[in-house]
């Protein structure tokens, strides 16, 4: 790593502070239940109150906004199942939302706090992992800045939905694996320089960063099941990195060595540990009698002598199957639904919130809106960067390009199956796990444009290529900032004239 270790932290932290101020500023506005917050903020409050999701009374949202938190249906002790809420996502994301409600109450700020915190932390994680991948603090800060200025990331960081938590755990897992890759190679080099020759190479010892990646991937699945695609892809990626490292160090049998030395530890990291971590997030359901389907096994097999834990597991498996069939058959239409092919083009954003007002902004017709849409400069620039990375990977086999392309594909391509096979209802914000890897693609291409630092050091002057490249990258960052500033009023529910709101609709028929 070139450059100052101190600035390697100070730079990303400053960018994170900037992104955090954007996300926390006026977080409680709008004082309303925005889009699917109606499900998750109540489920989260139920989890911290009861350990499971329960059914709320009619018009609970209005009661909550009026300051009333006594919103649960009352059930007799012998009819607890009637109060159990049928939920179709694992509980971790709602537990995370619940932390903010526990700290600040069942208020808009309370139920959005954790999303804002996680969104802010993801800026720091991305800046640091981009720095590690590019060996440049400047490019790391550039990546963090782009993520802080993406409209979809901004909106989801200010809304109590699950997707920002899924994105965070996927990004955290990726960052852990990049650190693990560096450390594994350092150990191989140290062994090569100090140990006798071997056909297979050494055991690399404990790999805590890979174990941490397994936990993060389990947590991603514990927010939404779509995290399983990243688990499978990152497991393969990490093992391929092990194969490549042993081959690069010159072992005669690198693949056999990796199979014997690395794969067993990989199974621990990507199978055993994720399963244990995933089950841990269901502790509230196992510990409570109020959970949906909690006593299914006992009800369908009265008098069965199986132990309590086996009955509980049978009920849990039955519940998981019900959720799976729900997602497979989800075909209801929605005015803001979109197909995955259209996501990179931002053709159909989601209107999270809209309210028209009269004579409140200096003119007759006024608008407050929260539009779930990415910053076009970033998204369209990322399309070009991804195409360039494909060509670069084919020509160079650069591991960084391959890793970014794989992660992006896992956030996007699986949805095509659901679109074709099940005609499933989908929305643009499902693409949020792709966004950090779009930013990484732009960042890697920015590094290619600027060129290596050693070229400038060797010549003693700034080469023309680096001057032009730096100017192009700086112009892109400036355009991103301007684009975000222009969209900000319709991302944050700022009260503006209706004409100003309409002027910001890039594709009028699709964005409205």
Image (cartoon, rainbow, N blue to C red):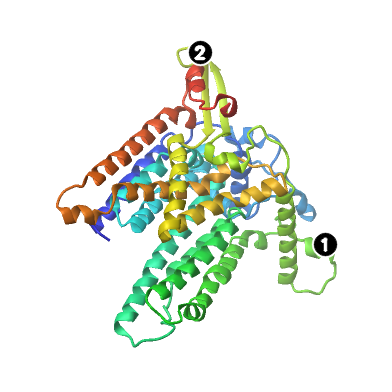
Q: Residue furthest left?
A: 460
State the SS at label 1: helix
State the SS at label 2: loop
- The disc, 1 or 2, on the residue closer to the chain's N-terminal end is 1
Residue drawn at (48%, 64%) of the image: 213
| Residue 226 location, quadrant | bottom right
Q: Which is closer to the viewer, label 1 or label 2?
A: 2
Q: Residue furthest front?
A: 395
Task: Pick whichever, 488 or 76, lies toward us.
Answer: 488
Task: Pick whichever, 88 or 58, lies toward us.
Answer: 88
Image spot of residue 349 (x, y percent): 56, 34
Task: Pick whichever, 331 or 165, lies toward us.
Answer: 331
Residue drawn at (61%, 64%) of the image: 279
**Quadrant the N terminus occupies:** bottom left
| Residue 384 location, quadrant | top left
Mark yes or no: residue 189 visible.
yes
């Amino acid at each position: 790593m070139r450059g100052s270790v101190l600035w390697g932290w100070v730079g990303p932290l400053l960018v994170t502070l900037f992104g955090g101020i954007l996300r926390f500023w006026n977080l409680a506005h709008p004082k309303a239940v925005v889009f699917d917050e109606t499900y998750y903020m109540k489920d989260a409050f139920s989890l911290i109150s009861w350990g499971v999701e329960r059914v709320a009374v009619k018009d609970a949202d209005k009661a909550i906004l009026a300051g009333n938190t006594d919103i649960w249906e009352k059930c007799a002790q012998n009819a607890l199942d009637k109060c159990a809420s049928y939920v179709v996502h694992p509980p971790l994301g709602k537990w995370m939302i619940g932390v903010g409600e526990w700290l600040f109450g069942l208020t808009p700020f309370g139920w959005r706090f954790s999303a804002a915190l996680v969104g802010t932390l993801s800026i720091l994680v991305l800046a640091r992992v981009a720095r590690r991948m590019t060996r440049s603090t400047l490019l790391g800060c550039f990546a963090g800045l782009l993520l802080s200025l993406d409209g979809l990331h901004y909106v989801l960081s200010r809304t109590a939905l699950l997707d920002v938590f899924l994105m965070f755990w996927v990004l955290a897992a990726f960052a852990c694996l990049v650190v693990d890759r560096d450390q594994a190679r350092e150990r191989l080099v140290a062994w090569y320089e100090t140990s006798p020759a071997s056909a297979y190479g050494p055991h690399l010892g404990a790999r805590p960063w890979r174990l941490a990646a397994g936990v993060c991937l389990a947590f991603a699945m514990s927010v939404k099941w779509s995290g399983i695609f990243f688990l499978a892809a990152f497991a393969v990626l990490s093992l391929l990195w092990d194969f490549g490292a042993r081959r690069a160090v010159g072992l005669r049998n690198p693949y056999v060595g990796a199979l014997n030395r690395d794969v067993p530890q990989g199974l621990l990291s990507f199978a055993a540990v994720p399963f244990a971590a995933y089950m841990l997030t269901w502790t509230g359901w196992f510990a409570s009698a109020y959970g949906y389907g909690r006593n299914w096994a006992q009800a369908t097999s009265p008098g069965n002598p199986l132990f309590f834990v086996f009955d509980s597991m049978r009920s849990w498996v039955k519940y998981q199957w019900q959720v799976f069939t729900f997602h497979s058959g989800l075909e209801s239409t929605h005015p803001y639904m979109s197909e995955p092919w259209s996501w990179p083009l931002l053709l159909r954003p989601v209107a999270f919130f809209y309210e028209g007002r009269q004579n409140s902004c200096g003119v007759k017709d006024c608008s407050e809106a929260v539009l779930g849409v990415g910053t076009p400069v970033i998204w369209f620039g990322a399309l070009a960067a991804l195409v360039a990375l494909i060509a670069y990977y084919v020509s160079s086999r650069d591991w960084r390009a391959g890793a970014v392309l794989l992660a992006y594909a896992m956030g996007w391509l699986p949805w095509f199956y659901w679109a074709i096979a099940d005609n499933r209802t989908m929305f643009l914000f499902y693409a949020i796990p792709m966004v950090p890897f779009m930013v990484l693609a732009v960042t890697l291409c920015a590094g290619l444009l600027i060129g290596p630092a050693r070229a400038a050091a060797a010549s003693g002057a700034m080469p023309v290529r680096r001057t032009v490249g730096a100017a192009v990258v700086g112009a892109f960052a400036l355009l991103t900032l301007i684009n975000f500033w222009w969209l900000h009023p319709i991302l944050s529910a700022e009260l503006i004239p209706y004409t100003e709101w309409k002027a910001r609709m890039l594709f009028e028929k699709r964005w409205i």
